[in-house]
Image: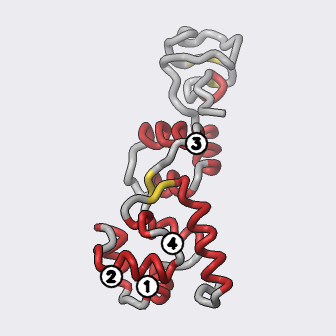
Amino acid sequence: MGINRTCETCEFNFEGICANSGVYQYGEKISDPGVRCDSWSIGLEYYTKILKAAPWYLSKLLRNCKINFDDFMELLEKDMRGEPIEINLYDALEEVYGITIFQIADILGVPVTVVIYARNRGTVEKRVYDFASRLFLPTALFDKCTSLDIPTIKLSKEKLLKNGILFV
């Protein structure tokens, strides 16, 4: 797959007329909407489609202004190639488990401020083993979690459900 960077999805394509200069000149009829152009800029309709189709861990970064649009597009293409994208473990837990940070704190047996600290600054070393065992997760995920680790987090959710720890 990949990002469709052609006249078809360009913001400068006005009903088949180019409103920029690139492959086609300003005002010229676009005879082949499949042409790639260096002057391409994403159109609103395509932007909306991409944002809806993007995985949660990328769209959340963009919506929360953690990355700019160019970085979003670069990460999206990287994700489409199956490359790992670093994600926040606690964001992944919320998303995959379908629970709030307060519920995560309850499962971990700690105040929510501890989980918020861990989300923002990383899990304190003395808590990693305890958190990992309570969540049925490998300790390595507390150092680095990527999009490729989501299946592991889903397995963790199943174990929590089977053990009556998680009720979703």
Is there CB contact under 8 Å for labels 3 and 2?
no
Mark 2 residue crowding within 10 angstroms, few (<14) / some (14–19) / many (20+)? some
Say whether disc 2 or disc 4 marks the residue closer to the N-terminus: 2
Residue depth check, mark 3 versus mark 2: number of the one nearer the observer: 3
In the rendered image, residue 13, in percent from the top left (x then y), is placed at 61, 23
Q: Secondary structure at mark 3?
A: loop
Q: How is the image coloured?
A: secondary structure
- 3D distance between C-alphas at marks 1 and 2: 8 Å
* 154 lies left or right of 90: right
Please indicate, yes or no, whether residue 168 appears anywhere in the rendered image. Answer: no
> In the rendered image, which residue does mark 4 sit on?
137
First reached walking from the N terminus: tag 3 or tag 2: 3
The x and y percentages for residue 32 are: 70, 13
Which type of secondary structure does the marked residue at label 1 adopt? helix
- Quadrant in which the C terminus is drawn: bottom right
Select label 1 or label 3 by which is in front.
Answer: 3
In the rendered structure, find residue 114 and report the number of the disc placed on it. Answer: 2
Q: Are marks 1 and 2 in contact (CB under 8 Å)?
A: yes
Q: Which residue is mark 1?
A: 105
